[in-house]
Image: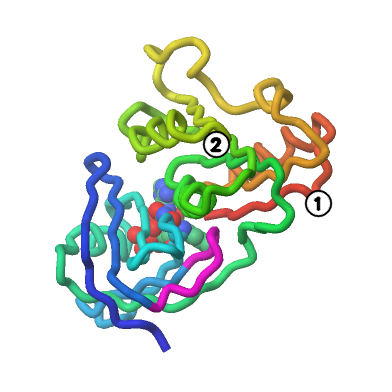
Amino acid sequence: MGMKLKVSKVISHSKDILSIRFKTNKKKFIPGQYFLVELPVLNNQIKRPYSISSSPKENYLEITFKKIEKGMLTPELSKLKKGDPATLTGPFGEFVYEEKNSKKIVLLGGGTGIAPLLGILRYCLSKKCKTEINLIHSARKNSELIFKKELERLDKENKNFLYTYTLTRDNSAPKNKKGRINSQKLKKYLDKKTKYYISGPPAFVDGMISSLLKIGCNDKNIKAERY
Ligand SMILES: Cc1cc2nc3c(=O)[nH]c(=O)nc-3n(C[C@H](O)[C@H](O)[C@H](O)COP(=O)(O)OP(=O)(O)OC[C@H]3O[C@@H](n4cnc5c(N)ncnc54)[C@H](O)[C@@H]3O)c2cc1C
């Protein structure tokens, strides 16, 4: 049975990327997991999975998504306003943050794949965890660097957190912020104790896994979520 929730806030990051918060006090999930979202305006006929970008400590569930012009659900999702209803079912998924086993973590997000990583990060930092956290966001262009301001602020405020991004389709980006994440860039994060959390489109995730394996990372230390 899904939870019938109401929108408490809509955040517009760019013309087609939004976050929506659904108010709830029943938010039992592990950072990294997803919920299925359906809308009464579509007669609850279309269900799609969305990772939760908020921490379980908040009194809302936040999803972050890109509007697909010809998609079935996202055009309607992006019309939602404060107070509108939606049904969320979950949580689901094995892409979960392993709190006990986390001295060092590297979060690698492609596009909106940053969503579950943000959930993990917000949870860790709000708990004042000692985990050493590196987050690298790969986006096409500047406007797709969602949450950049918050991430830069968290980077400044927390000694154990470092935020980096790279732009794959922006020739005007500074040299060290341009191009895809590759083995070369990942080398400096390599460490036997590090756990890698990768999330995004299948091509991004597969590319990151093969880059990590190439430089000698143990596949037991890699967790991945493909959209
Ligand atoms: C575990 C899991 C978690 C997910 N979490 C998120 C999330 O946090 N945020 C998020 O935005 N999405 C997420 N997704 C994807 C999401 O569930 C939908 O597939 C997506 O939002 C498109 O839904 P739609 O109904 O609008 O489009 P659909 O009707 O499903 O698709 C319409 C068409 O668009 C194409 N299409 C689908 N996605 C894209 C894309 N990204 N770029 C270009 N074309 C595309 C499809 O191939 C199809 O031809 C997740 C998927 C999985 C499996």
Residue at (44, 33) in percent of width and height: 157
Disc 2 element: strand
Q: Ligand 1 closer than 8 Å to the CB at disc 2?
A: no
Q: Three-letter amino acid code at disc 1?
A: Lys
Q: Are marks 1 and 2 in contact (CB under 8 Å)?
A: no
Q: Quadrant of residue 156?
A: top left
Tell me which segment is drawn in magenta: 26-34
Q: Three-letter amino acid code at disc 2?
A: Leu
Horizontal and vertical percent for residue 185?
65, 23
Q: Quadrant of residue 93?
A: bottom right
Name the quarter showing ligand 1. Answer: bottom left
Q: Nearer the viewer, residue 215 or 106?
A: 106
* Local crowd size for mark 1, using a 10 Å CA cut-off: few (<14), some (14–19), many (≥20): few
Horizontal and vertical percent for residue 203?
59, 42
Q: Is residue 102 above or below residue 210?
A: below
* Residue 113 visible in the current orientation: no
Q: Is residue 99 above or below residue 29?
A: above
Q: Is residue 66 above or below residue 192?
A: below
Per the image, the residue denoted by label 2 is 135
Q: Coloring scheme of the render?
A: rainbow
Q: Is residue 106 above or below residue 61?
A: above
Q: Is residue 220 magenta?
A: no
Q: Nearer the viewer, residue 202 or 59?
A: 59
Horizontal and vertical percent for residue 66?
34, 49
